[in-house]
Image (cartoon, helix red, strand yellow):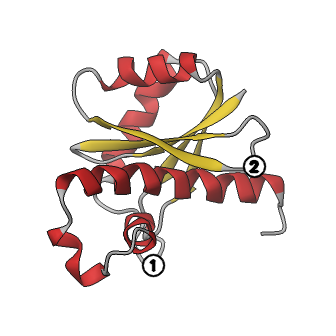
Amino acid sequence: MKFLGIDYGSKRIGLAISDEGHTFAFPKKVINNDINTIDEIGKILKENKVLEIVVGESVDSNGEPNPIMDDIENFIQELGKKFSLPIHKQKEFFTSVEARGRSGKEINNSRQIAKKENNRVDASAAALILQRYLDKRNNPQI
């Protein structure tokens, strides 16, 4: 069984999958945030035998919820109604910026990144969210 990591965005949702040992997170794909989102996530849950879901919790530098957090909470409620799996929140402070940095792009040039690369960034951000959760879960001292 695996974990699914989710980086929620108003237009796109990045997804990541853990390994069977719940040690490593890997970018999976990016899906559009539209009427088909929950069904697409359902397919991924089934295909990958997902045990638990981890959703990025959007906070600012002071740890306060960002404006998108209301949408994320509604999304989590939808997931909870549709799927009987545990859902966890993991703070996602600067995961997209970090994902861009890891792909070799300068933060100041982030607006110039091609759409295709933005999709990779969303999935990579989901992997960072999931990896942070797995690290915390596997090593509570972190």
Q: Position of residue 57 (x, y in %)?
A: 47, 54
Left/right placement of residue 43 relative to residue 33 reads: right
Q: Is residue 53 above or below residue 101?
A: above
Left or right of 73? Residue 137 is right
Q: Secondary structure at mark 1?
A: loop
> Looking at the image, which residue sits at the far front?
104
Q: x, y (%) of residue 34?
A: 22, 29
CA–CA distance in space, label 1 to label 2: 29 Å
Label 2 secondary element? loop
Q: Is residue 51 above or below residue 137?
A: above
Q: Residue at x 37, y 46 (%)?
A: 8
User: In the rendering, which numbered label is found on residue 23?
Assistant: 2
Residue 75 image offset from top left, x and y in percent: 38, 35
> Which residue is tagged 1?
62
Q: Residue furthest left?
A: 112
Which quadrant of the rendered structure holds the C terminus?
bottom right
Q: Residue at x 38, y 64 (%)?
A: 96
Task: Inspect the image, locate mark 2, and give the three-letter code of the amino acid beneath it.
Answer: Thr
Is 11 or 101 nearer to us in this picture?
101
